[in-house]
Image: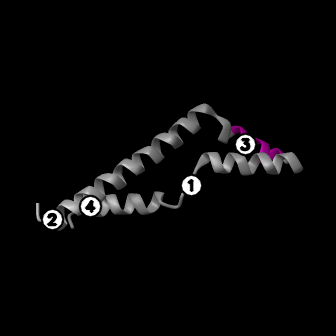
Amino acid sequence: MDATDVSGHLWREGRSDGYSIERDRDALARLIASDADPFELELYEWASDPQARFLDRARRSRLGQYRRRLRRSQERAKRGR
């Protein structure tokens, strides 16, 4: 395994926790519905920001592309290519 594979694995592991800004946004909306705390409102506004949501979708898409590429690479290595 070379340095690029190692750094890719580290990046993937750091992002594989299933984090999604949409899930956070939904949870914050439920909290605000029952108790509107100013800090929670600020977090909800951040999670509702179109640019933050766009960046989150782009990061998760890139992670999926990376996982597919890694899986195909490992399959080719098993076949001896």
Q: CA distance from mark 3 to mark 4?
A: 36 Å
Q: CA distance from mark 1 to mark 3?
A: 16 Å
Check disc 3 and report the residue beneath it. 44
Amino acid tagged 2: Arg
Q: Residue furthest top?
A: 50
Q: Nearer the viewer, mark 1 or mark 3?
A: 1
Residues shaded magenta: 38-45
Check disc 1 and report the residue beneath it. 19
For residue 48: magenta? no
* Magenta: main secondary structure: helix
Name the one closer to the observer, 39 or 49. Answer: 49
Residue at horizontal 33 percent and vertical 53 percent from the top? 68
Q: Secondary structure at mark 4?
A: helix
**x and y, in percent, of residue 44 in the image:** 72, 42
Residue at horizontal 64 percent and vertical 34 percent from the top? 49
Tag 2 or tag 4, which sits nearer the N-term? 4
Q: CA distance from mark 2 to mark 1?
A: 34 Å
Neighbourhood count class around disc 1 (C-alpha, 10 Å): few under 14, some 14–19, many 20 upward: few
Q: Quadrant of residue 41?
A: top right
Tag 3 or tag 1, which sits nearer the N-term? 1
In the rendered image, the vertical position of residue 40 relative to residue 55, given as above or below:
below
Tag 1 or tag 2, which sits nearer the N-term? 1
Residue at horizontal 53 percent and vertical 43 percent from the top? 56
Tag 4 or tag 1, which sits nearer the N-term? 4
Check disc 2 and report the residue beneath it. 79
Neighbourhood count class around disc 4 (C-alpha, 10 Å): few under 14, some 14–19, many 20 upward: few
Tag 3 or tag 2, which sits nearer the N-term? 3
Residue at horizontal 44 percent and vertical 44 percent from the top? 61
